[in-house]
């Protein structure tokens, strides 16, 4: 039963990735200023869209690492260096998303303070909060996993004493 639930989570991650990619490719055509634009004008003349696509790389890398982490769990390799590496990568991706979202928010608040930016700032703050929760969760899980790996891999003092090399005369 556990393997089925992990497989369900992996399928969910794949569907989230497909949905996010489809939304990112479809949404620019819905903007009012792009209603009659050519695909080249939509995708290659918009610096904001380029920035959003660049920032989304971290999101998709984190999704891929979560998929791999679930694969390690399904194979009973949760206490491995590969799992710790996947968690660290998820943590770094979440931190980079915070930076990618926080920088434009700071720019908007400093450069465009008079405009009506409340909706965009609110969405950015919620997204930053969600990324911070993921980064913190990944950091805590990584530290727990590392401590478990150290206890499993480090021999006890009695084991070290019995297996220490003897000096030859």
Image (spheres, rainbow, N blue to C red):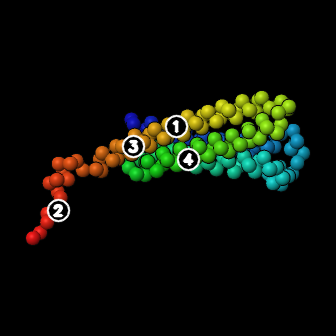
Lower sequence index among marks 3 and 1: 1
Q: Which residue is mark 1?
A: 136
SS class, disc 4: helix
Q: Nearer the viewer, residue 93 or 112?
A: 112
Q: Mark 1 packing: few (<14 Cα in 10 Å), some, or many (20+)? A: some
Q: Is residue 21 visible?
A: no
Which residue in the rendered view is the most extreme toward the front? 169
Q: Residue at x 59, y 43 (%)?
A: 95
Q: Position of residue 30 (x, y in %)?
A: 81, 39
Q: Is residue 167 visible?
A: yes
Which residue in the rendered view is the most extreme toward the right? 36
Q: CA distance from mark 1 to mark 2?
A: 43 Å
Q: Which residue is mark 4?
A: 92
Q: Which residue is mark 3?
A: 145
Q: Which residue is mark 2?
A: 165
Lower sequence index among marks 1 and 2: 1
């Amino acid at each position: 039963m556990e393997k089925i639930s992990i497989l369900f989570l992996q399928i969910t991650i794949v569907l989230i990735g497909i949905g996010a990619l489809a939304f990112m490719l479809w949404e620019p055509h819905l903007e009012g200023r792009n209603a009659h634009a050519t695909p080249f004008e939509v995708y290659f003349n918009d610096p904001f869209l380029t920035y959003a696509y660049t920032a989304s790389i971290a999101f998709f890398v984190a999704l891929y690492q979560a998929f791999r982490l679930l694969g390690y769990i399904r194979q009973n390799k949760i206490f491995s260096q590969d799992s710790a590496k996947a968690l660290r990568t998820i943590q770094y991706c979440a931190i980079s998303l915070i930076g990618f979202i926080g920088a434009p928010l700071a720019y908007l608040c400093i450069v465009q303070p008079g405009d009506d930016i409340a909706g965009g700032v609110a969405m950015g703050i919620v997204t930053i909060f969600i990324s911070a929760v993921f980064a913190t969760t990944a950091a805590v899980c990584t530290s727990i996993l590392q401590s478990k790996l150290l206890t499993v891999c480090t021999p006890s003092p009695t084991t070290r004493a019995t297996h220490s090399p003897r000096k030859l005369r």
